[in-house]
Image (spheres, coloured by chain):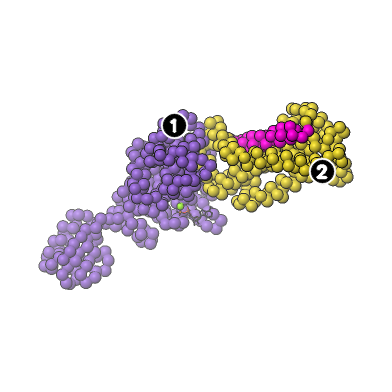
Amino acid sequence: MLPAIEIHNLSKAYGAVQALPTIDLDIPQGEFFALLGPNGAGKTTLISLIAGLSKADAGYVRVMGHDVIRDYRQSRRALGVVPQELVFDPFFSVIETLRLQSGYYGLRRNQQWIDEILHNLDLTSKADANMRALSGGMKRRVLVAQALVHKPPVIILDEPTAGVDVDLRQGLWEFIHKLNSDGHTIVLTTHYLEEAETLCTRIGMLKQGRMVALDSTDNLLKRFSGLKMRVRMVGGAPPESLRPLLAAPATTDEWVLALRDYAHAEQVLAELRKSEREIAGMELTQPDLEEVFVSIMRGE
Amino acid sequence: MRGFLTLFYKELLRFWKVGFQTVAAPILTAILYLLIFSHVLEGRVQVYPGVSYGAFLIPGLAMMSILQNAFANSSSSIAQSKITGNIVFILLPPLSHFEFYLAYVLASCVRALAVGTGVVLATSLLFVSLPLEQPVWIVVFAVLGAAMLGTLGMVAGIWAEKFDQIAAFQNFIIIPLTFLSGVFYSIRPLPEFWQNVSKLNPFFYMIDGFRFGFFGISDVSPYLSLAIVGSALLALSCAALLMITRGYKLRA
Ligand SMILES: Nc1ncnc2c1ncn2[C@@H]1O[C@H](COP(=O)(O)OP(=O)(O)O)[C@@H](O)[C@H]1O
Ligand SMILES: [Mg+2]
């Protein structure tokens, strides 16, 4: 099947700053993809190139098979973008903003879908409010609504939950998850790694414009941070047989052991029992995207 | 088509919602100009035989208002959208380059022509009645002048990164070219050198041709004016379309 987004040999510099040296990336239709990376990694630059908001120095991007420069009208029709900056037009109310946006995409009689978006984003009561009068979180929701007015098959959200409170974040994710279940391809960037971990099926990590990791969420978690066992023993060092498993230098009474899987935990327990020392405490810790992220960004 | 109509409509709303500043205020300014200049100079200056100075002045002031408001509309709208960042709402949708260009320029024309009509009506009702010798020329030059300055405003709006730069464009290019174009005088009595300098100014032809529509008298043939203003509009439109197509400063 045609990829939703196809990025080939793409590069972009701003003067002397190589924002993106070269990127190759395919995002299949229906995927929920997270683009992660520290500030300045090039996430927004990449999104701008996909959206045709800026021009690449080399390479190309296609959205649903349409080149974003040559076939810009088709590619833009297929794409909805929630920009990172909290932008709005102070001349208009929420409903005017959405009707205008809908019109720019050539749609008329779109009121039913607009009402549905307003409802799903909990904006119905604010429909007639002027954009200036909205809080930051509300403005962010209007930006999401604007990106959806033309029911694009591909939706990109650049830090959609930045500065949005917890309740709202939950609601927003539910809605986006529903859109993904309905077949929309979703790409997002976020600083909340738990969100990416629970929602996204695949993750790309950017560091200084380079894709330093690109894999399914499960694989990344397995590859970079397996299951860990934290054990506290009454006195003494770990048995020799367990030393190779130490994830960090052991302190006198607490060791952190890296395990392959749950079955491995059984063997480790058996070894500990053989040493005939008393276990004072034990805890299994799940792999966690935060850890993966930190270790990849350190360049491990 | 629908996309274009929506952008055009949005641009109309943008100035209409603050119509007091964007339409009424410039009409009032023109009335004040007329009041002062015609009071001071009436009877002392007669530019065209049988035409009072007040009457002579009205088309010039109307054209000046048309030009300034056409420029102000597109330049401020684009610069404002760029600076506040909400231009993404227009850059993301599938509007064609030409739709983008046309929507801004037409909206500028509507505002400019509303102001121009207001100036002519208000001044001729309040002060002197004007002849309408060749109304077709009036419409032609009003529309061409508005379109040309609307286009120039687009170019300035796309180029500018700060509001100061728009103001500089206005103060150092638009206003001098307007004032030296014969809004307040005919170039005929000028020394030959200054007549020739005036003839390098495209704004001169807009005002001269526009005035011809009212009085049937002009400094140069209206056909010459039409050719020059038309070419200037075409050249500026090509420049604006090239900037839009290339994404100059819009899609960096
Ligand atoms: N318009 C611009 N002009 C100059 N440099 C830019 C511009 N936009 C981004 N950059 C630079 O490109 C790099 C990537 O930025 P960005 O894509 O915004 O990162 P992220 O979204 O991952 O935080 C940064 O070094 C940033 O300073
Ligand atoms: Mg960013």
- What shade has chain B been given? yellow
Mark 2: amino acid: Val
Q: Which residue is label 1 attached to? A: A111
Work out whether residue B161 or residue B51 is closer to the camera in this orientation and state it.
Answer: B51
Visible residue check, residue A243:
no
Mark 1: amino acid: Gln
The tag on residue A29 is: none
Q: How many marks?
A: 2
Visible residue check, residue A107:
yes
Report if residue B119 lies within the magenta region.
Answer: yes
A42 over B47 or under it: above or below = below
Marks 1/2: CA–CA distance: 59 Å
Q: Which residue is label 2 attached to? A: B40
Q: Position of residue A263 (x, y in %)?
A: 18, 54
Q: Residues within 10 Å of mark 2 (few under 14, many from 20)?
A: few
User: Which stretch appears magenta?
Assistant: B99-128
In the image, what residue occupies the spot 24% across and 70% down? Answer: A251
Judge depth for marks 1 and 2 and give the one in front.
2
Q: Magenta span: helix, strand or loop, mainly?
A: helix
Q: Position of residue B222 (x, y in %)?
A: 79, 32
Label 2: state its secondary structure. helix
In the image, what residue occupies the spot 21% across and 58% down? Answer: A284
Label 1: state its secondary structure. helix
Confirm if mark 2 falls within 8 A of ligand 1.
Answer: no
- What shade has chain A been given? purple
* Quadrant, the C terminus of chain A: bottom left
Chain letter belonging to callout 1: A
